[in-house]
């Protein structure tokens, strides 16, 4: 960036020098020693006017290219640093006579913007501190039960799909698989989203007591089945969203809103509301701000942090607390909005009393059975040959007991 700006200043200086005003009647290559004066003099620029025009045009083109390059670089830098649109661009600063890139460019874009950001942060600062559990939410989609052969699937009412689609794994579980007419490519809603699918001959399925015979598209989708616009338009379906009802052949089909059986999401995010700095070798406990939780849940830490966060089981209605352990020798900063963990519902909590707890004991190295020391075996053999078994046993015990005290044995 500095090199480009130096090049621009050099080109501007050259342009001013070329367009300088000379005294009439003097050649362009006049030396400054011939007549002293304060007016600008051009040395060795050229004698022909066409050569000067060519130089001027080349310099102007070079300046325009350099200015466009600097503008693009400044825009990329502002996008990376998140500068506001009201910041001055290099072109605007360059038109000022007092512009100095090395002295004012960095400070003009730094201090002014930072002070404005500080004022904006003070106005939008939240009073709530600690860690919050943000709900991801579940998708609420209208579904109905469709029976294909002896299998019931949850079909999604999708007016955005042009055709009716059956999941490939569901198709493979059918006892009598429909005949495949051909394979084709299905185009998704996104750009360049292609999916290979198979077209079947008309398949019979039922919704409540209504029976239909429709052609299906078999594709690798997430839901079991999609009732597309071709099916809805063909049978003049009337969809009543507020009442959650679908009218087919003058028959009202009650729809299910996906997410009603489990209104509380299965997974939530745990994020930091304000920037937190944890000192080295410190444990910090922070209260969590949660929404109404209707069941017990488990807080799981994320694995990309240098902090130690234990798993925590929180009961319904309990004020949760999260513990951060910094075992390093330097402070750890948790920026605002950082995701430190997630929560998930707990359906079964098994008590440790039902399982045998591991016992803790003292282990010792295996030692050989005590016997007569090697340097006393000869004495035992010579002395015990004339003794009875009881006397030999007594002698053996004495040798073992006083093996480290030979003086007592001699006495």
Image (spheres, rainbow, N blue to C red):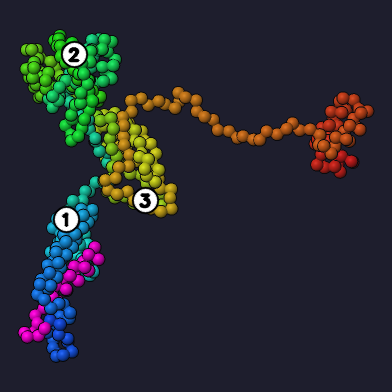
| Alpha carbons under labels 1 and 3: distance apart | 30 Å
- Spatial CA distance of label 3 from label 2 is 63 Å
Res 368 quadrant in image: top right
Task: Of the two numbered discs 1 and 3 on the same chain, state the one appearing first in sequence.
Answer: 1
Image position of 386 with respect to 99: above or below? above
Residue hosting label 2: 201
Closer to us: mark 1 or mark 3?
Answer: 1
The residue singled out by tag 1 in the image is 84
Q: Position of residue 21 (x, y in %)?
A: 9, 80
Quadrant where the image shows the C terminus: top right
Extent of the magenta region? 1-27
Looking at the image, is mark 3 or mark 2 nearer the viewer?
A: 2
Return the x and y of residue 22 as percentages of the image width and height.
Answer: 9, 82
Q: Which residue is mark 3?
A: 332
Q: Look at the numbered disc 1 and give the secondary structure of its residue.
A: loop
> Going by the image, does 1 lie left or right of 402?
left
In this view, the residue in front, 148 or 26, is 26
CB contact under 8 Å: marks 3 and 2: no
Nearer the observer: mark 1 or 2; the answer is 2
Q: Give how far across and how far down residue 6 sits, in percent.
A: 22, 69
């Amino acid at each position: 960036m500095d090199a480009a700006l130096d090049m621009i200043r050099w080109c501007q200086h050259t342009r001013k020098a070329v367009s300088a005003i000379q005294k009439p009647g003097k050649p362009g290559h006049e030396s400054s020693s011939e007549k002293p004066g304060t007016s600008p003099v051009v040395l060795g620029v050229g004698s022909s006017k066409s050569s000067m025009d060519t130089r001027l045009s080349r310099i102007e083109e070079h300046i325009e290219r350099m200015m466009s390059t600097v503008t693009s670089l400044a825009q990329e830098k502002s996008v990376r640093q998140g500068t506001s649109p009201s910041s001055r661009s290099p072109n605007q600063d360059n038109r000022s006579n007092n512009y100095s890139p090395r002295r004012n460019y960095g400070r003009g874009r730094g201090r002014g913007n930072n002070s404005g950001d500080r004022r904006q942060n003070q106005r939008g600062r939240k009073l709530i501190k600690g860690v919050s559990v943000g709900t991801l939410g579940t998708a609420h989609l209208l579904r109905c039960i469709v029976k294909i052969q002896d299998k019931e699937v949850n079909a999604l009412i999708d007016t955005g799909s042009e055709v009716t689609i059956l999941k490939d794994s569901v198709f493979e579980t059918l006892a009598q698989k429909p005949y495949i007419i051909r394979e084709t490519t299905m185009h998704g809603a996104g750009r360049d989203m292609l999916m290979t699918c198979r077209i079947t001959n008309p398949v019979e399925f039922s919704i409540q007591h209504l029976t239909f015979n429709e052609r299906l598209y078999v594709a690798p989708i997430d839901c079991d089945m999609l009732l597309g616009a071709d099916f809805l338009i063909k049978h003049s379906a009337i969809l009543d969203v507020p009442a959650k009802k679908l009218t087919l052949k003058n028959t009202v089909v009650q729809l299910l809103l996906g997410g009603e059986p489990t209104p509380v999401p299965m997974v939530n995010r745990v994020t930091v509301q304000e920037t937190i700095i944890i000192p080295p070798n410190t444990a910090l406990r922070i209260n969590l701000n949660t929404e109404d939780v209707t069941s017990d849940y488990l807080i799981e830490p994320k694995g990309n942090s240098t902090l130690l966060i234990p798993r925590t089981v929180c009961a319904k209605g309990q004020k949760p607390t999260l513990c951060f352990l910094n075992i390093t020798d330097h402070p750890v900063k948790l920026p605002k909005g950082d995701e430190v963990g997630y929560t998930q519902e707990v359906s079964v909590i098994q008590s440790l009393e039902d399982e045998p707890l591991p016992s803790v004991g003292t282990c010792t190295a295996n030692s050989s059975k005590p016997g007569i020391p090697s340097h006393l075996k000869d004495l035992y053999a010579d002395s015990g040959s004339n003794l009875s078994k009881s006397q030999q046993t007594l002698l053996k015990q004495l040798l073992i007991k006083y093996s480290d005290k030979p003086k007592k044995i001699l006495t």
